[in-house]
Amino acid sequence: MIQLSNIQKSFGKTEVLKGIDLQVNKGDIVSILGPSGSGKTTLLRCINFLEKANEGTIKVDNIALDVKTASKKEITELRKKTAMVFQNYNLFQHKTVLQNITEGLMIVQKKSEKEAIEIAKTMLTKVSLEHKANNYPSALSGGQQQRVGIARALALNPEVILFDEPTSALDPELVGEVLDVIQKIAKEGITMIIVTHEMNFARDISNRVVFMDGGVVVEEGTPSEIFNNPKSDRTKQFLRRLV
Ligand code: ADP
């Protein structure tokens, strides 16, 4: 489903990704863990070209692109197969909850307004926010805003949803409701890649865990392999610091 080969990314002289290879199968739920600054978010953003990697190839579904030669049109096509849930929700503040979801459906996917509204309402029901459809984001809690972000991603019916630390901006008491929603949609079989610091969540939800440090994948495996029996000293050290 997704194949990343030799992804390299630098910001100025700082080498942030040093040749990442990663394969994600359809229906996989992959958590990416690692210390702050290890390149997790950058890797996620390179997958949909929110950041353009300097080297490597990215394949999503049937579109395989060399980052150096990909055309704008090819990048747009690849982006349509992905949806992102951002750390800070990234909702349009001057649009209602419903409009936040219908916008992409009408503009990117060229759906009629009627169809877009229907889809948006279905997705809002999934995240238990149908009663907030006509509110503006500012009237919602952070947890509710993030659930709108998730509904918006789901509405696009992507091949993969990319979650970039979806709960890290939330007050602790609001984290649970967002993780619950992600857990619920995970059961529907949609492919997900999740950058997270929530270790228990990663252990529960993922079928694969990737541990990154210093711009490389140090180790990957099942949650049980990574959490109960990590091979690398760096992984062990990282997990020890958390307990
Ligand atoms: P993580 O998600 O693991 O915390 P990031 O991918 O956010 O790591 O960042 C990795 C490194 O890249 C950090 O040192 C960060 O400062 C740097 N970085 C990320 N984005 C940019 C940017 N747009 N410009 C310059 N440096 C950046």
Image (spheres, helix red, strand yellow):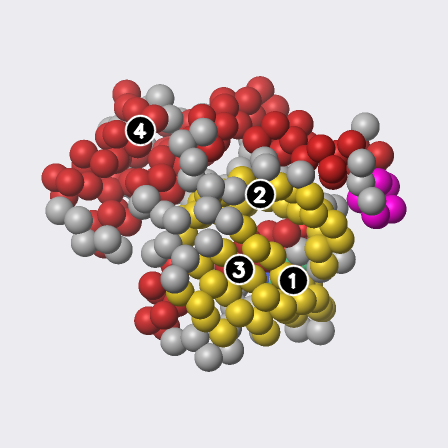
Answer few, some or many: residues within 10 Å of disc 3's Cα (few below 14, many 20 plus, some between 14 and 19): some
Res 134 label: none
Res 124 label: 4
Image quadrant, ligand 1: bottom right
Residue at image location 43% in from the left, 75% down from the top: 70
Tell me the distance, in whole angstroms, between the alpha carbons under discs 4 and 3.
Answer: 31 Å
Coordinates of residue 137 in the picture (x, y in percent): 36, 33
Residue at image location 34% in from the left, 26% down from the top: 126
Coordinates of residue 100 in the picture (x, y in percent): 30, 41
- The disc, 4 or 1, on the residue closer to the chain's N-terminal end is 1
SS at mark 3 in the image: strand
Dot 2 amino acid type = Val
In front: mark 4 or mark 3? 3
Q: Taken as a whole, is the magenta stretch helix, strand or loop?
A: helix
Please identify the quarter of the rendering in which residue 81 is found: bottom left
- The disc, 4 or 2, on the residue closer to the chain's N-terminal end is 2
Answer few, some or many: residues within 10 Å of disc 4's Cα (few below 14, many 20 plus, some between 14 and 19): many
- The disc, 4 or 3, on the residue closer to the chain's N-terminal end is 3
Q: Which residue is mark 2?
A: 30
Res 3 label: 3
Answer few, some or many: residues within 10 Å of disc 2's Cα (few below 14, many 20 plus, some between 14 and 19): many
Quadrant in which the C terminus is drawn: top right
Image vertical order of residue 126 relative to residue 101, above or below: above
Q: Which residue is mark 1?
A: 20
In front: mark 4 or mark 2? 2
Please identify the quarter of the rendering in which residue 223 is found: top right
Residue 201 in magenta? no
